[in-house]
Amino acid sequence: MATSSTDSSAPSRHIPDLPVQAADQENSHTSLQPGKADVQEMVEDPHTRLSQATQSLTSLTASFDKLPEEKNTILEGNVAIEQRQAHMSKATAKSAREISDMTIKIQEMEAQIQAYEIENAELQDRVTALETESHTLQCRVQDLEIEKK
């Protein structure tokens, strides 16, 4: 009978424990609330990051799609610049040749002028000599004419 008295006393012993158990559960529930909020935030945070990453990826994709067009525009500009530079280089080379040719002609003309000046000086000397000789001969002719008279 000791068993039956233990059996009948067991349910009554559990009833006074119910408020304590309810209080423990409430404490457990209250202590779990911040954790639950953290878990909820952690679940929402990856979703937010995924949305932001998707938006960033979309923006980057749009930017990368524009890069070939921008590159082509820049390359076309570079080609135009190189063509202008080639044209300017040809024009510069032509001008340099013309300047060189003119410089050579000027040097030739200066040499010819010097030769003419030398020839002119020689001719001046010859004219002076001939005038002197002419004057001498005229004086002689006059002397001969005076002697003849």
Image (cartoon, rainbow, N blue to C red):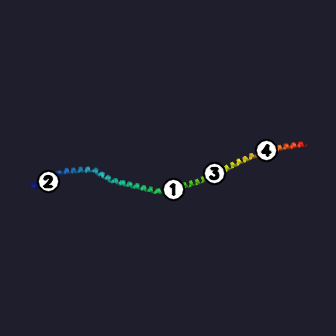
Side of 127 where 85 appears, left or right: left
Give me the C-alpha separation between circle 1 and circle 3: 37 Å
Closer to the camera in the image, 147 or 33? 147
- Under circle 3, the secondary element is helix
Q: Quadrant of the N terminus?
A: bottom left
Q: Determine which residue is flagged by label 4.
A: 129
Side of 1 where 97 appears, left or right: right
Classify mark 1: residues with Cα within 10 Å, few (<14), some (14-19) or many (20+).
few
Q: Nearer the viewer, mark 2 or mark 1?
A: 1
The residue at 15%/52% (across/down) is 13
Q: Determine which residue is flagged by label 2.
A: 10
Q: Position of residue 33 (x, y in %)?
A: 27, 50
Classify mark 4: residues with Cα within 10 Å, few (<14), some (14-19) or many (20+).
few
User: Which quadrant of the view contains residue 46?
Assistant: bottom left
Side of 11 where 53 appears, left or right: right
Give me the C-alpha separation between circle 4 and circle 3: 43 Å
Q: Determine which residue is flagged by label 1.
A: 75
Q: Position of residue 60 (x, y in %)?
A: 42, 55
